[in-house]
Image (cartoon, rainbow, N blue to C red):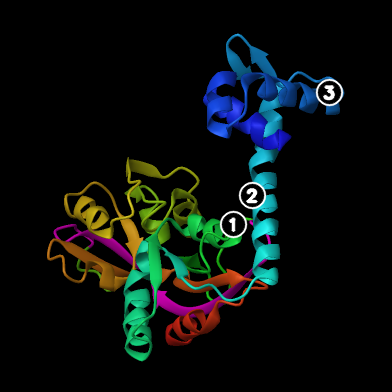
Amino acid sequence: MLLRTFTTVARAGSFSVAARELGYTQSAVSQQIAALEASLGGVALLTRRPVTPTSAGTRLLEHAEPLLLRAAAARADVLRAAGGPPDHLRVAACPLAMPRLAAAFARATAAMPRLDVTISVVARDEVATAVARGACELGLAVGLAVPGDPLRLPDTGPLRAVGIATEPVCVALPADHPLAGRAGLRLADLDAARWLDAPDAAAPAADLRRATGAEDLIHCARYLGTDLAGLVALVAVGAGLTLLPAWAVADHPAVAAVPVTAPQIEYRTELLSGVTADNGSAGRALAAFLGA
């Protein structure tokens, strides 16, 4: 509770705003911050006017979010273990997972006409977070990986991750680009190209750096949407290159997809669920139609 209060005050920059958000009095918030500082030997975590983290407070913030996430994940895991199968199945999925999820959902609803499912489209790391927190029973995460390796997911606590599919990776570039007619491309030859950082829709900058072996990629734009159509439209007008499965650009005549020949990478899809989860017949049916 003290950590949550501290992070809320630090983010809001105000004791009164944090109090309204948390449903406490301003006095209670001040007392909780004082108690947290006292528990750390009297170290000041916040300056009061203006309300900003001290150097010690900044360091604590770096630890606080992962700790709060692990606490939420632990609570969700305990509740999953104690409870029965959910009446309503909630699924979080990456944009790149949606065609596979839609096909599985169609088969599942054909077999179970009264299937009740809510689908949320979020960034890859948010899929893992949603499942860990118990906001969703199942998650479908897609990301770049070396063949045979699991996805790099945030440390959210124990999750069950099952690889269900892999797809070849292509460089998406304008159809009139000088390299668009190549049979294949080595990413090392594109380290000076303009890349699109698309952390929510496809490949974040960290994945691009690992794939190309370039520490300093030249980013023409950072795309924060989850709409693949918007990302492909940016590629079409020359805003930058990105890495996608070929199907993602198949219907866009102004964009070409050239297979990556080196390094050996693939788009890997994993189905995520709680370690102790029992998602009922709906969850088992959907997982089966996904191939898990």
Mark 3 residue type: Ala
**Between residues 242 and 42, which one lies in front from this camera angle?**
42
**Between residues 183 and 5, which one lies in front from this camera angle?**
5
Image: 40 above or below 235: above
Name the residue carrying label 1: 133
Q: Is residue 49 magenta?
A: no
For the N terminus, which image quadrant?
top right
**Between residues 198 and 13, which one lies in front from this camera angle?**
13
Magenta region, residue range: 156-179
> For the residue labelled by badge 2, is the local secondary structure a helix, a strand or a loop?
helix
Q: Is residue 276 visible?
A: yes
Could you give the CA–CA distance between mark 1 and mark 2, rounded to whole angstroms? Answer: 7 Å
The circle drawn on residue 175 is none
* Residue at the outermost bottom position: 111
Mark 1 residue type: Arg
Mark 3: give few (<14), some (14-19) or many (20+) Cα within 10 Å.
Answer: few
Which residue corresponds to the image point at 60% horizontal and 16% vertical from the top-left? 51
The circle drawn on residue 69 is 2
What secondary structure predominates along the stretch shown in magenta? strand
Name the residue carrying label 3: 38
> For the residue labelled by badge 1, is the local secondary structure a helix, a strand or a loop?
helix
Could you give the CA–CA distance between mark 1 and mark 3, rounded to whole angstroms? Answer: 30 Å
Which residue corresponds to the image point at 50% horizontal and 79% vertical from the top-left? 283
